[in-house]
Image (cartoon, grey):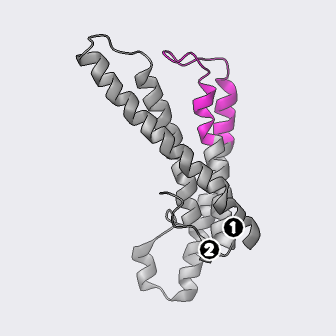
Amino acid sequence: MKKLSYFLDQSLFKLISFIAQLLLWSAFFAGIYQVFARFVLQEPAAWTEPWTRSSIIWIVFLGIILAFRRGEMLKVDVINTFLSDGPRRWVRHFANTICALFLGLLAWIGGNMTYRVRFQTIAGLDFPISWIYAAIPIGCTIALIALLINWFGDNSQIDTNIQE
């Protein structure tokens, strides 16, 4: 499990972080261009708003992968401060179980939705809207893997620069 965790930290999770950063920058520049085109050129671009919205959707689902890998979405700090080690472990296991069930359910529902909209296109971008919906099953499935690695794996080697 340590080797798999290390490999995923050095490859998959760094790639996800890089892609999320690229999408964030592209959303930023698309927004800047939209303001420039609308108010300076007096001709708003039709593609910037759907691109920005689509990028942010992907950023959210890629971001939850990194958050689950680092264990950042599993903290119940208020409860944990009052509990000893044994009950604290039970709270962590309960929270992880709920998160795993939710991610699995969301991945399944997102996969169904992605399949249903496969023939629709995004106005202004002219590519299938299923590419945007695919963020849900892809993000939740990889987040589930990240959750399981964080839950059962050795977290001493987590790269703290994954999100940077």
Which residue is pictured at 64% across the width and 23% down the height? 117
Vertical position of residue 131 compared to residue 159: above or below: above
Task: Return the x and y of residue 149 as percentages of the image width and height.
Answer: 68, 66
Q: Is residue 148 left or right of residue 29?
A: right
Kind of residue at disc 1: Tyr
Quarter of the image with the N terminus in it: bottom right
Residue 132 magenta-drawn? yes
| Furthest residue toward top | 43
Q: Position of residue 71 (x, y in %)?
A: 54, 67
The image shows residue 95 at horizontal and vertical percentages of 56, 67
Q: Is residue 95 above or below residue 124?
A: below
With respect to residue 54, does 62 lie above or below? below
Rendering coords of residue 142 (x, y %) = 66, 51
Q: Are marks 1 and 2 in contact (CB under 8 Å)?
A: yes
Q: Which residue is mark 1?
A: 6
Q: Amino acid at mark 2?
A: Gln
Q: Which residues are magenta?
A: 108-136
